[in-house]
Image (cartoon, rainbow, N blue to C red):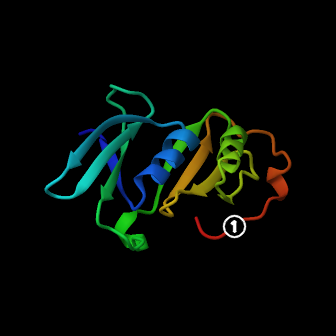
Amino acid sequence: MRYLHTMIRVRDLSAALRFFCDGLGLREVRRRDHEQGRFTLVFLGTETGTDSPQIELTHNWDQTEPYSGGRNFGHVAYEVDDVYAACQRMIDLGYVISRPPRDGRMAFVRSPDLISVELLQRGEARVPTEPWTSMANVGEW
């Protein structure tokens, strides 16, 4: 058995792609439009054309209301080379860090569809540094 993907329902596909691709650095691996079913599937990964696990963004064309927490997901996690740089990139794109990396190891940020994304420092934790060490939690993650 092997892990294939995690599916997340999104209301605004462009906003979700900006978050996951521009913010997190994922790449679109493949996309399928299902006109009869009125939905689009976009698969994102860390590398194109590989066998690595992916995020499947499901965009139901007629969905206008936000999804409830149970309808989309809890959280996904990515290991990053520099948790501080990853968080700064997200802030620069206008996203709020819900749980800052005060410990130099772990942070959480939420997508436009309120999916929590955990960012984990690869290897040893970074040395705790400002402004992260004194930054407060914001909302839920």
Q: Residue furthest left?
A: 36
* Quadrant of the rendering where the N terminus is positioned: top left
Q: How many marks?
A: 1
Q: For the point 34% across and 26% down, which residue is it?
A: 50
Callout 1 environment at 10 Å: few (<14), some (14 to 19), or many (20+)? few
**107 is higher (above) or lower (below) than 53:** below
Q: For the point 42% across and 58% down, which residue is it?
A: 12
Q: For the point 84% across and 58% down, which residue is it?
A: 134
Residue 113 image position (x, y, % from top left): 47, 62
Q: Nearer the viewer, residue 25 or 117?
A: 25
* Quadrant of the rendering where the C terminus is positioned: bottom right
Q: At label 1, which amino acid type do we have? A: Val
Residue 110 image position (x, y, % from top left): 56, 59
Q: Quadrant of residue 2?
A: top left
Residue 5 image position (x, y, % from top left): 32, 45
Q: In the drawing, does residue 70 fall left or right of residue 75?
A: left
Q: In the drawing, does residue 70 fall left or right of residue 23?
A: left
Residue under label 1: 138
Q: Quadrant of residue 62?
A: bottom left
Which element is circle 1 on?
loop
Q: Nearer the viewer, residue 105 or 70?
A: 70
Q: In the drawing, does residue 37 fall left or right of residue 2?
A: left
Q: For the point 80% across and 40% down, which residue is it?
A: 127
Residue 27 image position (x, y, % from top left): 44, 34
